[in-house]
Image (cartoon, grey):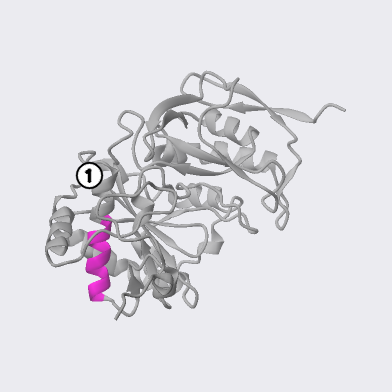
Amino acid sequence: MASERITLTVPGPDGDRELSLSSPNRVIWPEPGITKHELAEYAIVVAEPFLRANGHRPVSLERFPDSVDGESFFSKNPPRGAPDYVHEVMCTYNSGRRHPQVVLDEAAAIVWAIQMNTVVFHPWASLAVDTDNPVELRIDLDPQPGTDFSDAAAVAPALREVLREAGLDAWLKTSGNRGIHVFCPIEPTHEFLDVRHAVIAAGRELERRMPEKVTTAWWKEERGERIFLDFNQANRDRTMAGAYSPRALPAATVATPITWEELAAGVDPTAFTVRTVPARLAEIGDPWRDLQERSGRIDTLLEWWQRDLEAGLGELPFPPEFPKMPGEPPRVQPSRAKKPAE
C-alpha cells in the first residue's frame, strides 16, 4: 500500500516550491500528538529567524524514523537524491577527515530535512564560506543533578558581565531542556581551538567569582550541585540544538531565543514548544534579529587564557572521541587515576 502523501507550498527566494511530504499524520511527539505535518508547518512559519540563526553553515541533522520515543541517528552529508536547493560544504573534522556537510539556505531545505525525518537541527558555529573560523562564541550553562533552569538563570547575568568586560555582547536562548545557551557574535579571526580556549578563560573567571555555583570540572564526580560551564561545546564539530530547533523531548519544546529581561522576570523554558513559538514570534518578533550586527573579538579572553597558563592552569580534557591534544591532561576520571607511589 502506497504511503500517504501531501503537497506543501513553501515560499522561498526563487518563488514557491512544491514539496511532497510522506506520512504526514505520523505522530512524532506522542504526548502532545504533534505530527510530521504539523512539524513541517512549524518550520515554514519560523523559517526566517531559523535561517538567520542556523542557515548558511554546516548543520547536522538528528533524524527519527519513528517518533521521538524511538531510535535516532545523525546525518551530516547530503544523501543521494537531495534536491538542488539543499546545499553542501566540505568540512574538516578533528581527525583530519574531510567530507561534505548539509547547508540549509531556504525554507524548502528545512522542510526537505523534515521529510527526511529530522527533528533536531545542530548547526556549526562557523559559516559555509569559512568553516574553520567560528562567527559565534557559544557557552552552554548545563545544570547538574540537584540544580535546574533557575540555577542556570541565576548564573547567566554574572557570565554576561564577564563577557562584557572582555568586550563581547551576550545573547540568550533556552536549550529546550534545563540549560541556557549564551552566544556572543565574534569576528571569524580565530579557529575553533582558540575559541575553545576563550570559552575556558571566561569560564574560569566566572568560576572564580561564583565558586559555589559554577564549575568547569570536566569529570562529573567533581562538579557537585553546580552549573557546569561546558567548554567542550566550543570544539569543532561539537554542536548544540540551534535557535528555533525543536527538541526530541516529550513536550516538543523548542530551543528559543529570549531577552535578558525575560530571564530576569522568571521565564519558563517549557512554555516554548512547536505549538507556542509561532504565536510568540508573531507577538514579539525574534529577540535575535540583531545578533550579528556587532561582532566582537576574543583577544581579551585569549589574554586571560595566557594569564591562566602562566599561573599554572593548563589545558582541560577533550571529549573522548577526539585525538589526543597538545598539553591535554590524562583522560581518566580522578577516582580511577593511579595514585603515585609513596
Type of the residue with mark 1: Ser
Left-right relation of 129 to 278: left
Q: Is residue 23 above or below residue 185?
A: above
Circle count: 1
**Quadrant housing residue 32:** bottom right
Q: Is residue 173 above or below residue 185?
A: below
The C terminus sits in image quarter? bottom left
Left-right relation of 40 to 140: right
**Residue 78, position as x, y percentages in the image:** 53, 27
Q: Is residue 24 above or below residue 177?
A: above
**Residue 244, position as x, y percentages in the image:** 49, 47
**Residue 109, position as x, y percentages in the image:** 53, 29
**Quadrant housing residue 169:** bottom left
Q: Is residue 136 visible?
A: yes
Task: Mark 1: give few (<14), some (14-19) or many (20+) Cα within 10 Å.
Answer: some
Residue nearer the viewer, 120 or 8: 120
Residue 176 is inside the magenta segment: no
Residue 203 is inside the magenta segment: yes
Q: Which residue is mark 1?
A: 295
Q: Is residue 169 visible?
A: no
The N terminus sits in image quarter? top right
Q: Is residue 213 above or below residue 239?
A: below
Residue nearer the viewer, 84 or 274: 84
Residue beneath the point at 38% across and 53% down? 233
Specify the principal SS of the magenta part: helix
Residue farthest to the front, as pictured: 341
Residue nearer the viewer, 173 or 208: 208
**Residue 239, position as x, y percentages in the image:** 43, 47
Write down the region rendered in magenta: 199-209
Left-right relation of 306 to 260: left
